[in-house]
């Protein structure tokens, strides 16, 4: 019951690693939006495995097909079915894992929850599940860009101990991020990160990282108080991405060390709107966007599936060792960049549609 | 549209700082649960302002009344109405803020969203909003304790730069946490924290902090894959608490620095269940609880309302200064401890009820 | 989990017959709406028991209190808490029913569902449950009237075999309906109905009836295709009212007897819009309003609680007789008139808010 | 936003008349259910056009493909993607309707709502939309049958003025219903109905009808009070089927004519449960099933698309005539029989899963 995201722009995703297809259905996409597969494919291509030496060699063309909801290049206001066929399936690689749950993977918890699990590759816990989200998120982004000129750019800001100092994100573009395979906009840092990932891969190990994300041109007024705070929805969205362990907005955990006098974002006139001098709030105050860039960071753990031999126990509790074969990424953050952007887009479009409605009802007092 | 939390155990909260009452209605509480106001009042008392010199002197008895859904000491399965009357109202204190939005507070964003805002005290962005949650959360906790013996304990683990080294949380109880006003179980650290908050208060400033939380005896199998992952729901729940800026589960942001070989939680037989040697996963794998303690941390910013004079702008964009009068906490974390526990309880009870249903349908393969 | 109605204008109701209070919380009411208790009280007064010799003598003032969400006469956009205290409680009247489930009442099914039931008076199956709805519905109606000039008028069109020929409803007002206690706008028919209800009451029996309802000035475009069709939502709404057994829109069951050539509503220009010559569609085509009046009918069964002695069985299956004491209406339709209007208003305001959002997104092709 | 049905067993459907595919995704199907395409195909075959001379000659094989959620013949607990490709598309047939909205069809209202509409054949208002529901409903039925032995049988009980006297439905099976093309279990009545439909078709006209439905072996306790009453959910479900105009449960509109003394269903011991002597309640009391058969009736209007020339207006308001070409059913009720069963199954499985959860929480008082 948890394969649906969003209230107004509602996405239901489907598909495992080794079934016929993965995809999503969008319910609530406004009518009369110009849309074709070409608007969706680029983010799928950025998410796709096999793009570089840094990622799993699993080969998937990941061509999206629009099944419904679009006619003559315009959305009808009806559900948009999006499908990507699975092609490269090697369940054989995962055979041993049938009796030994991979440490820190979902094999054990799926078995405990469902009393059954996909025979291989992790089922819905596989990164393959994110294909449907990314397809739907591309539609969300498309709306945000056309209607409000919102720009969402995520990048790799940390791999292991290597950190990319928070650059000025006011002009950062995806083209800067995509200049290298690791997706870090600072070329020198990117090179060090790349070398680290190669070393880790060589050692049949894996490594964690952090993705930072900025959403520019988000108007003031998006997000709902209390349980639907913009940062709360972003937190849910980001922690729903496989392998994530943390989320922070604006000053994040650093805020715990600060005093109000240093942390408060003073107001100042910026053109024809009220802005803030600093942005410790990360663009959100009281759960509602304030017109400044929405900025957040997401922590990813090192992938659980590693080639090194690990001491562990099988489902029966017997001590054993496991050395994963299969295909797997030594570090997920480069490929997770479009997934972070996707989830941000799904959160923002939902908030935008809600505010669109509320704002138009009764004249304001100002 | 964001004042509802949960799917099965669904809570709708209501109330601002200065209206007649705050409260909540619970839809979906199972029938035949022994329940009275005495099961709810203790957490409200722990959340209540005016408990110590560290918090706002606003005086509220915060006595809860059960309006409906309980008869002869048992729940009926019908909605449980919970109400706490507002008593101590001093809207005068907030007058100046009518023209000057408080920096890093929600005055500006509420105005931009709604074109109107509660005349004083922040409306639904006020900490007073959390009364309804805590009342409902106490019912959730009560169910979790009776049915599954789940224990949820949160504590202050950081104030400013003062950090309480992650103690062994396997035996930590609320009684340990409540031994001091700052709610840090390590007495020496608590004393340093208390002194820091006093200094900050003296300086008419405020300070941030971190709350850690452990949920023990959560059975394996709670939480839904994909968008309803247990950590995703916890992240939304925690970031919905006023003044929060970050959430991390298990190894959290530290995971970004680690390698899989060091991060993976090896399985090992523990009594009659499979457990893990380490708990970097924080009790959750693939979005589903694995039977280990669920452990997470929440970052709080320093409260925005401070007595110090701040340079800022009014709603018209004119430069001005603001020095808040009113009543406010120099540090929210001590009073936020029961709110963190509340939100954890609301997430867990919802996951528990869902799993209760699914597990009973068709016989498993084991 | 079924005490919530609506997606955008979401109402959660609470309260049984004999608890402290009944009421509702509205989540999603737009901000800046002028609102006071005086906008809500009139419909509660029309629903109230004890209005005439035709209804139950239970005495309840049913004064509504706005607990939250309104300040200085304007809605804040935050949840609106609405409460009506219960006063006249005579649980003693219902004692016998503790062991004998009333035939065609909910005593038995509540016991089977919950393993417990409100000690008296039917709990949430009592007509008292509708107080919360009517309070919330009055707010919905208020919005519809202010923003779109929508007028909703329901009336008693049948009691037993006495039928009020479908009058021209284009000008019918509540003032016409309220001219008599039975709430039938045709005075001659009303008199016959009133006499019938008196006779039935005399015989300690009860009688069924039909309520018709028209919603004028509903603009074209409200209602969503497929599961959220306007008529589907109206059907759910109406069948959620206690004692209802049927719903029909436009030509209703009569449509089964007709041919398309006679049933189709031909289009014709009406002022500056396209209208239809006939209105067999009841103002809705394909689930979406077409600008014609929305017209429907709701069937009510005779109340189950009657004073006559009935042969039945107790909870243990033993044969017995039951003659209800307590207070009860011999015919519910007069008092159900505002409840039907309420549910229509809740459906329409939800559809209106949804369309408000969708319509404003991308420019149309016309 | 209205293409989702159900809370626990949640179905999202997609697809228009002339897009690539129609289908559904099920979120919340329990794991470990034996399921294959063979469990789904039969109901799709019964719904399929072109089965007899009575229906549209549109030819569609309507072969369902399970895209995801099933492995080795068992459900995984993950979303089940169901797809049926569209094949026989003749948009040319609908060209004239581009400028003239078909009377009583959804052409006009879709245009008013969306500012765009599917170029032909009615988009989501087409009966083709029901393919996705029927596929998902077959899975729901499969669960109900395996777990609770629930049997759902619908049949044509009226076409035009020809009525099939309510037969004893306690033993009625689908095999009886399918003995003739009109799907009326009484062979003599069926023949008269068939002749009537042939005559109507000959006259290039259409005719309405009624479908009756019985759900046997529904245990007591399903359905939620207030807005989620079992009859309310059935009413929404049935009125969401294209061309429906009315719903009644048990005694239905006839109840309006009756007295309580004659209408009340007296309790009586039946084997090891309490049953009722009569079933005017239609198996539901207070919104909750009572263990008796759930019985209801659904009214269908005559199809709007007819070959006869009709006087009407075009979108610009100019008077004109329209004679539909295209393919269309003269009477929808025979093909709507499996759709009614489908929607009943979707309502029941959702209620069943909810009760499954609630019932297992705290021990009852009996």
Image (cartoon, coloured by chain):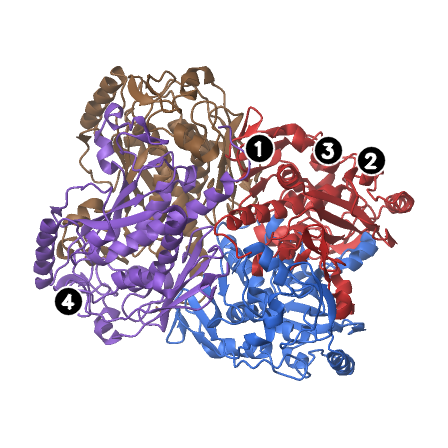
Chain colours: A brown, B purple, C blue, D red
Residues behind callouts 3 and 2 on a single chain: yes
| Residue C91 x %, y % | 55, 74
Q: Which residue is mark 4?
A: B323
| D61 lies left or right of D79 | right
| D188 lies left or right of C359 | right
Say which element carries label 4: loop
Chain assignment, label 1: D
| Residue A17 x %, y % | 46, 25
Say which element carries label 1: loop
Whole-angstrom CA distance, mark 4 to mark 1, is 64 Å
- Pointers 1 and 3 in contact (C-beta within 8 Å): no
Whole-angstrom CA distance, mark 1 to mark 2, is 34 Å
Q: Which residue is mark 3?
A: D45
Say which element carries label 3: helix
Q: Which mark is residue B243?
A: none
- Pointers 1 and 2 in contact (C-beta within 8 Å): no
Chain assignment, label 4: B
- Pointers 2 and 4 in contact (C-beta within 8 Å): no
Whether residue B87 is situated above or below residue B224 in the rendered picture: below
């Amino acid at each position: 019951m948890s394969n649906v995201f969003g209230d107004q722009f509602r996405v239901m995703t489907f598909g495992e690693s080794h079934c016929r297809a993965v995809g999503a259905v969008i319910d609530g996409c406004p009518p009369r939006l110009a849309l074709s597969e070409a608007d969706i494919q680029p983010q799928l291509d950025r998410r796709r495995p096999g793009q570089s030496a840094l990622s799993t060699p699993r080969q998937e063309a990941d061509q999206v097909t629009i099944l419904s909801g679009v006619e003559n290049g315009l959305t009808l206001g009806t559900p948009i079915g999006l499908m990507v066929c699975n092609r490269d399936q090697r369940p054989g690689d995962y055979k041993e894992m049938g009796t030994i749950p991979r440490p820190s993977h979902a094999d054990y918890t799926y078995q405990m929850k469902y009393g059954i699990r996909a025979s291989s590759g992790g089922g819905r816990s596989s990164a393959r599940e994110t294909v449907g989200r990314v397809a739907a998120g591309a539609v969300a982004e498309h709306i945000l860009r056309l209607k409000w000129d919102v720009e969402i750019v995520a990048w790799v800001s940390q791999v292991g101990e290597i950190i990319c100092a928070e650059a000025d994100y006011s002009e950062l573009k995806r083209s800067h991020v995509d200049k290298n395979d690791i997706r870090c906009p600072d070329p020198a840092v990117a090179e060090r990160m790349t070398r680290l990932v190669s070393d880790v891969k060589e050692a049949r190990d894996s490594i964690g990282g952090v993705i930072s994300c900025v959403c520019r041109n988000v108007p003031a007024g998006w997000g709902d108080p209390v349980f639907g705070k913009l940062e709360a929805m972003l937190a849910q969205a980001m922690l729903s991405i496989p392998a994530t362990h943390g989320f922070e907005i604006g000053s994040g955990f650093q805020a715990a060390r600060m005093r109000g006098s240093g942390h408060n974002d003073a107001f100042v006139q910026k053109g024809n709107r009220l802005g803030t001098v600093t942005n410790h709030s990360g663009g959100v105050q009281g759960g509602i966007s304030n017109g400044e860039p929405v900025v957040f960071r997401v922590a990813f753990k090192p992938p659980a599936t590693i080639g090194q031999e690990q001491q562990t126990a099988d489902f029966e509790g017997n001590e054993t060792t496991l050395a994963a074969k299969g295909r797997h990424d030594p570090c997920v953050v480069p490929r997770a960049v479009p997934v972070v952007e996707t989830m941000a887009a799904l959160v923002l479009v939902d908030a935008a549609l809600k505010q669109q409605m509320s704002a138009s009802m009764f004249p304001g007092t100002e």
